[in-house]
């Protein structure tokens, strides 16, 4: 882990009508840091993650990633930014049901002009790393929950991002599979130096993190 | 646009794809078959004259002969003067003309329907040269007769016999089978045109009803440009007067009486309805399909697909589905056209076009030209249908794609 700041949010607020979900939050994440964002359901964790990852634009404040201000970017610029700089892991995997494991993994590369063989090779290598080399051609419906999440993690890594945003990545898994996924994320963090911002409401999972950020009623209580 | 994704989406969501494809294909099939039927009726309307190489026949109605004896003109076909023929020949759209003279000859022992025909012409009854079943056709303008085969059998007329018609002798040189020919070209005896003109010219009864010069005729056959027939028919009536009967494919269409035959507007309206149905079906099923994929679109956008990437992908899916629908629609229409081609249509031939004295056998009967409806799908209609289908797909895909691509990924991914 280096001391350089990879991601920072300054005075971030987000309101939906009169409802203020995130209130004046400022935080920063260093390159290669594993940060856990914990708090009760509805406290604004997912919204803050969306603001920091460029899925959502803040009502006020700004987000800097790799010294780039993404707050004022257009929707398409944000899409390209997400494709090139970040990876996502969702609670319910969000795999495309009609695509095989390798195709789901390569999904962020589909709009990128590159040889099809290279696309498949990159996806295959990542899936082999996730111990899913034997499941390349399987559809999500033929995979277990743990396997689906590992495909989702492989998809998050396909563009070699500096940071992965994980929103309750073990929320839909049994405890054993959840532990395995957490171990995998930790390995990525320690061996590959990928920064991780993980949202969870389970305090137990946050033990593996370098740092814990608590949220309550849209505010950060670090 | 990604082919892997497109192919997998269409293949793995077979039910969804099939519903879209079948729905639109029914609309396309309806459009194709309606137009094919309309074309078939139009083609059928050409048949009564097609066998004699003509598109239009011209006759002039006159008075009924006071006394049915000797050589007379049927009241539906009196003199068309030579100068009128020349004027008509020079009208725009006239490709060529053929001439004939139809006579009723009442001899003391027998009544004949006699047709005077040209020796060589690809338009008009001269085309019967190819219908000679035995003997030969006319040669060198000699006074000869060819007898209709069935008539010859009935009255035991042999080749080499001499027929006495209106006190003139015509050696029989052949038989011809006119049963498959246009009704207007059916007679008992065929003689050279010049001989028929001479018979008409020397007949006092013809001259008393309708003055006739040696070069005149009473039947005119025209090969014409299809697009100019209506305009040409109107000009002919102006040249020849109100009592003129101009038989055209359009006039046979009216006699057919079918909705398809009666009106281009009906076909156009029905086609428009079919297109609208096709568009609505395509739009509804594809809108439903895309609505089911909102979350998927959200994922695509979250992992870095731009709006343009999403629209292009949905556009391509929609175009391919609609292309398949167009092909399936054509196949359905092809099967329907094949089945419909067994349907027979009876085109009524007005008595005026095949006048037979009422006291002769069959003289008062309504004559029909019976034929199988020539239903087929022309290439241009097939290409148009597939293109239309693809255009519908493109527009639907682009429209729905644009709409759905506006969703924010955070909105659809938030509620897990």
Image: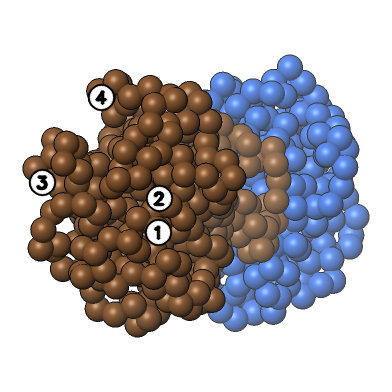
Chain colours: A blue, B brown
Lower sequence index among marks 2 and 1: 2
How far apart, in angstroms, are the residues tagged by discs 4 and 3? 20 Å
Q: Is residue B258 visible?
A: no
Disc 1 target residue: B197
Q: Is residue B64 left or right of residue B191?
A: left
Q: Is residue B110 left or right of residue A73?
A: left
Lower sequence index among marks 4 and 3: 4
Which residue is at 14% across, 62% downward? B65
- Dot 2 and dot 4 within a common chain: yes
Compared with B228, B348 (above or below) is above
Comparing labels 4 and 3, the label whose residue is closer to the camera = 4
Q: Secondary structure at mark 3?
A: loop
Disc 2 target residue: B116
Q: Could you classify mark 2 by the number of other residues whose Cα lies within 10 Å: few (under 14), some (14-19), or many (20 or more)?
A: many
Compared with B72, B107 (above or below) is above
Residue B198 image position (x, y, % from top left)? 40, 58
- Dot 4 and dot 3 within a common chain: yes
Which residue is at 80% across, 57% downward? A84
| Marks 2 and 1 in Cβ contact (< 8 Å) | yes
* Label placed on residue B358: 3
- Dot 1 and dot 3 within a common chain: yes
Disc 4 target residue: B155
Q: Is residue B343 visible?
A: yes
State which quarter of the image contains the C terminus of chain A.
bottom right
């Amino acid at each position: 882990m280096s001391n350089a700041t990879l991601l920072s949010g300054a005075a971030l607020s987000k309101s939906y009508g009169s409802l203020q979900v995130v209130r004046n939050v400022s935080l920063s994440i260093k390159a290669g840091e594993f940060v856990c964002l914990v708090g009760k359901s509805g406290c604004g964790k997912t919204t803050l993650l969306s603001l920091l990852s460029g899925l959502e634009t803040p009502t006020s404040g700004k987000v800097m990633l790799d010294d780039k201000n993404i707050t004022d970017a257009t929707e398409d610029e944000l899409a390209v930014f997400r494709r090139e700089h970040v990876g996502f892991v969702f609670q319910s995997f969000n795999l495309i049901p009609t695509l095989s494991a390798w195709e789901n993994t390569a999904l962020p590369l589909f709009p990128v002009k590159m040889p099809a063989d290279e696309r498949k090779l990159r996806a295959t290598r990542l899936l082999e790393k996730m111990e899913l080399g034997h499941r390349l051609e399987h559809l999500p419906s033929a995979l277990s929950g743990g396997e689906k999440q590992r495909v989702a993690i492989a998809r998050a890594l396909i563009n070699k991002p500096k940071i992965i945003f994980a929103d309750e990545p073990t929320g839909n898994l049994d405890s054993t599979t959840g532990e395995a996924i957490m171990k995998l994320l930790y390995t990525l963090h320690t061996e590959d130096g990928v920064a991780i911002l993980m949202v969870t409401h389970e305090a137990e999972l946050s033990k593996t993190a370098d740092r814990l950020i608590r949220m309550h009623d849209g505010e950060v209580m670090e | 646009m990604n082919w892997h994704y497109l192919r997998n989406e269409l293949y793995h969501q077979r039910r969804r794809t099939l519903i879209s494809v079948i729905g639109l294909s029914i609309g396309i099939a309806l459009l194709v078959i309606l137009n094919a039927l309309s074309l078939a009726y139009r083609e059928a309307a050409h048949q009564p004259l097609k066998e004699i190489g003509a598109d239009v026949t011209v006759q002039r109605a006159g008075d009924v002969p006071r006394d049915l004896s000797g050589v007379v003109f049927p009241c539906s076909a009196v003199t068309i003067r030579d100068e009128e023929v020349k004027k008509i020949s020079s009208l725009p759209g006239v490709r060529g003309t053929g001439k004939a003279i139809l006579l009723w000859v009442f001899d003391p022992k027998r009544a004949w329907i006699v047709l005077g025909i040209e020796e060589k012409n690809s338009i008009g009854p001269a085309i019967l040269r190819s219908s000679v079943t035995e003997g030969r056709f006319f040669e060198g303008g000699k006074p000869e007769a060819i007898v209709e085969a069935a008539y010859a059998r009935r009255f035991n007329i042999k080749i080499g016999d001499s027929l006495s018609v209106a006190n003139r002798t015509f050696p029989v040189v052949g038989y011809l089978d006119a049963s498959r020919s246009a009704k207007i070209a059916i007679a008992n005896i065929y003689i050279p045109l010049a001989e028929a003109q001479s018979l008409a010219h020397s007949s006092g009864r013809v001259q008393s009803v309708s003055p006739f010069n040696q070069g005149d005729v009473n039947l005119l056959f025209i090969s014409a440009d299809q697009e100019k027939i209506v305009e040409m028919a109107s000009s002919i009536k102006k040249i020849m007067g109100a009592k003129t009967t101009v038989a055209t494919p359009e006039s046979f269409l009216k006699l057919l009486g079918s909705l398809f035959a009666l009106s281009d507007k009906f076909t156009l309206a029905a086609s428009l309805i079919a297109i609208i149905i096709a568009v609505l079906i395509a739009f509804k099923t594809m809108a439903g399909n895309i609505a089911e994929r909102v979350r998927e679109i959200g994922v695509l956008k979250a992992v870095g697909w731009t709006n343009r990437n999403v629209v292009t992908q949905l556009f391509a899916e929609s175009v391919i589905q609609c292309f398949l629908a167009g092909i399936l629609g054509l196949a359905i229409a092809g099967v329907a056209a094949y089945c419909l081609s067994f349907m027979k249509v009876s085109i009524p031939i007005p008595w005026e076009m095949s006048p037979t004295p009422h006291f002769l056998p069959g003289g008062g009967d309504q004559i029909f030209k019976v034929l199988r409806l020539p239903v087929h799908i022309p290439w241009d209609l097939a290409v148009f249908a597939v293109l239309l289908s693809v255009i519908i797909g493109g527009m639907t895909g682009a429209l729905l794609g644009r709409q759905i691509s506006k969703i924010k990924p955070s909105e659809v991914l938030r509620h897990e």
